[in-house]
Image (tube, rainbow, N blue to C red):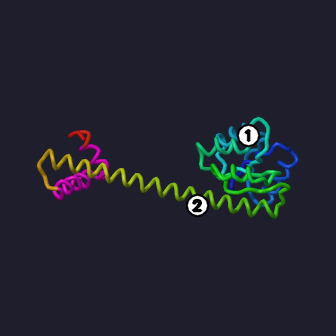
Amino acid sequence: MGKQILVAEDESLVRMDLVLMLQDAGYEVIGEAGDGEKAIELAYQLKPDLIVMDIKMPKMNGLKASQIISKTFNIPILLLTAYSQKEFIDKAKQANIVGYLVKPVSEANLIPAVEIALNQGAKTSEYEKKIELANKKLLDRKTIEKAKGVLMTRFNLGEETAYNKMRQISMNKQMALEKVAKQILLKYGS
């Protein structure tokens, strides 16, 4: 299955052209929106791999919709506009905006921009997972250190002895060391 894309464009003919270009290139267009509010609704429902969104749309513009979507999801967004003014470019440097195309959009412009946007989105997602894992490891380490300190104080143990005791419990019960640490903190207080 190809990458899933949501297209948000208020001009129906332009939207149809975009959808056809994307489909011809092997992408799956899983949703279409004619305004920013619908784009947000579909982003929440469908969680696409990429959103191709026009800046100027009724009800809510693409920049505002992008900001709202980016607060919840890490979906890369490729903006389209008939304007290349600096104010739009400056505003587009926020949220998950990974690209910017000026209309009229040709397949020669669209497909490389989509490829780059998807690649950037994947890299960002990978980095976020690495950060999340590092934060979890740090939190686990702090929990283990805290539990070790509780054992040292409560049972008058040396640091190495307290740690070895926790490791022994971990191996005997076939339980992760941070879970043993959490149990120690629950039982003997923090």
User: Residue 170, image x and y in percent?
Assistant: 26, 53
SS assignment at label 2 = helix
Q: Residue furthest top?
A: 59
Residue at x-position 57% and y-position 57%? 124
Give residue 40's quadrant in the image: top right
SS assignment at label 1 = helix
Residue interval drawn in magenta: 159-184
Task: For the N terminus, give its image quadrant.
Answer: bottom right
Q: Is residue 175 above or below residue 59?
A: below
Residue 164: in magenta span: yes
Is residue 13 at least partly visible in the picture?
Answer: yes
Residue occupied by mark 1? 36
Residue occupied by mark 2? 123
Q: Work out whether residue 136 or residue 90 is closer to the camera in this orientation and state it.
A: 90
Neighbourhood count class around disc 2 (C-alpha, 10 Å): few under 14, some 14–19, many 20 upward = few
Q: Amino acid at mark 2?
A: Lys
Residue at x-position 18% and y-position 48%? 151
Q: Work out whether residue 89 or residue 69 is closer to the camera in this orientation and state it.
A: 89
